[in-house]
Amino acid sequence: MISEPPASTVVATDGLVKRYGSVTALDGVSLAVPAGSVYGLVGPNGAGKTTLLGILAGLRRPTSGSVRVDAEEIGVLPDTPTFDKWLTGREVVELAASLTGAPADRSAVVLRDAGLTAAADRRVGGYSRGMLQRLGLAGSVVGRPDLLLLDEPAAALDPAGRREVLDLITRLRGQATVVFSSHILDDVQEVSDHVGILAEGRLRYQGSLADLLVGERTRYRVELGTRAPERLVAALGRQRWVAEVRPVDDATFEVEVTDVDAAERSLVEVLARAEVPVRSIVPHRRSLEEVFLELTA
Amino acid sequence: MNLDRLERIRLVRTRRIWVLVGVYVFFGVLGPVTARFLPELLAGLGQGVPVELPPPTPIDGIAQFNGNAQQLGLLAAVFVAAAAVALDANRGMAVFLRTRATVPELLGPRLLWAWIGAVVGYTAGAWAAWGGTVLLLGSIPLDRFLAGLALEALYLGFAVAMVLLASTYVRSTAAVGGIAVGVLIVLGIGSLYRPVGVWLPSALAGAIDAVVRDGISGYWRSVVVTVGTIVATWPIALRRLSTREI
């Protein structure tokens, strides 16, 4: 399930392979990251996410395949950002600013956005893991990068720290193209608009999150005010857009459809013709976790 | 904040400069004192056994300093350099730095300030030894003392270059420092064979007392080899580090 590459991509790889000795970390990955998107790279531990981001950042070389990155300034945040403990948070960001040619006053802005103004003049040796992650993000965005590569930015953080980092990523939408890896599917579903599902070094899905969650088939859960009559189930089964009708209980059933447009036009009509009281019709949206498990099983 | 300032404050805030100065100055003070009072010390330890020693000379003061400084002092200098030069010892920090600056931009100030730190430490110790020697044992020719100091500074540059080279083969600070010390020890042993030793950089290690005694003229071969090695190390290290994956 790989969608056609979008017209305007910031990152494009073609048949990317990376081997470490006999271990194949990436196996023919063709990534296409649309400009301006927040692209969630999902995969279990060991799927090849860090390797892929490392190649995009220029820190690792592919064994074969090609990489195109159309960005003048790239910000990179490793999974465990580490800084000299004897520097203050402000000095870390000022160093990042000076190395990327950002104006000096930009440091205060990104420190404020990261919620670190109060701690800016404390040495980072005393920072919590969440503060280090936010400091790393501040250092990554201070140069106003066109492309941000974030490796597991919210992993190993407590819920409050995770929330802060996800909010920061959300605020970056529209300012830069963001590619971030995660094995926390809820995080990806919350902030991404595009996803790539990576498993065992292969890209199992790539495309918009919305398309992925709707899928080629979708289900509607129909609850009636009475027992579902056989003739209704039979009538639904005869529709060409219906793949399956599954009873849940006496008054509730699920209709799996192959054509969402047709279902949206005709489902209500079929129910009305059966003259049954309808309490609710709820489209069942798949969670990213469901899809992920389907694709990686 | 820039990379040059980063290295200057690394030396100060980590207190590494004070460690270097402290170690060398300690031996600088101790050297002339030990040389001056060695007969008394040995007599005290000998429990009545007479110990005959020639009267101490000013060169003995410098030599005592040098003997100690070449061991603990050099060890400290190498590991202080390793802590700065081992760029990839920590992946999180390596990613932060290497995605923002080139390897030469990162290494230049690190090597320079590691070397300056070592030279400052050694120089402080040597001046302490010089002062103590003049006070306790008599004067020594200043021009020869300065020439010996310059040779030691060059040798410390070689030691830092070996740290750089080691950092291209291994990543951890301890391993980088260990390999560099190992190379220096092997070269030191090699220099015991005089036909080869006069060409080796290790001939410069601790040459200060010999230079004070005999002058600098015998060291041109090792100076040439040392400078050549330091210069050659740079492109080799850059090529290896620039292609190393993080």
Image (tube, rainbow, N blue to C red):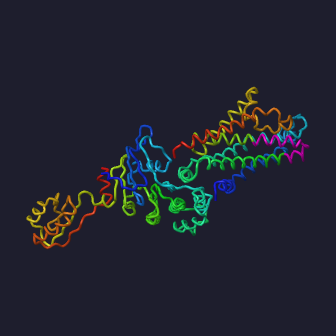
Please, is residue B231 above or below residue A206 in the view?
A: above
Give the residue drawn at x 33%, y 59%: A288
Camera-side residue of B106 and A250: B106
| Residue A77 image position (x, y, % from top left) | 50, 56
Which residue lies most toward the front here? A7
Q: Residue A30 in magenta?
A: no
The quadrant in which residue B213 appears is top right
In the rendered view, tell whether residue A89 sits above or below residue B76.
below
Q: Is residue A4 left or right of residue B173?
A: left
- What residue sits 46% from the left and 51% below the top? A69
Give the number of callouts: 0
Residue A134 in picture, x, y percent from top left? 51, 62
In the displayed structure image, the side of residue A212 where residue B121 appears, left or right: right
Q: Quadrant of residue B15?
A: bottom right
- Report x, y in % for residue A17: 41, 43
- Name the residue furthest top: B195
Question: In the displayed structure, does residue A49 sit left or right of residue B192?
Answer: left
Q: Main secondary structure of the magenta part?
A: helix
Q: Nearer the viewer, residue A237 or B24?
A: A237
| Residue B134 sits inside the magenta stretch | yes
Chain part drawn in magenta: B130-153
Residue sitting at the far left: A231
The x, y position of residue A35, in whole percent, is 42, 58
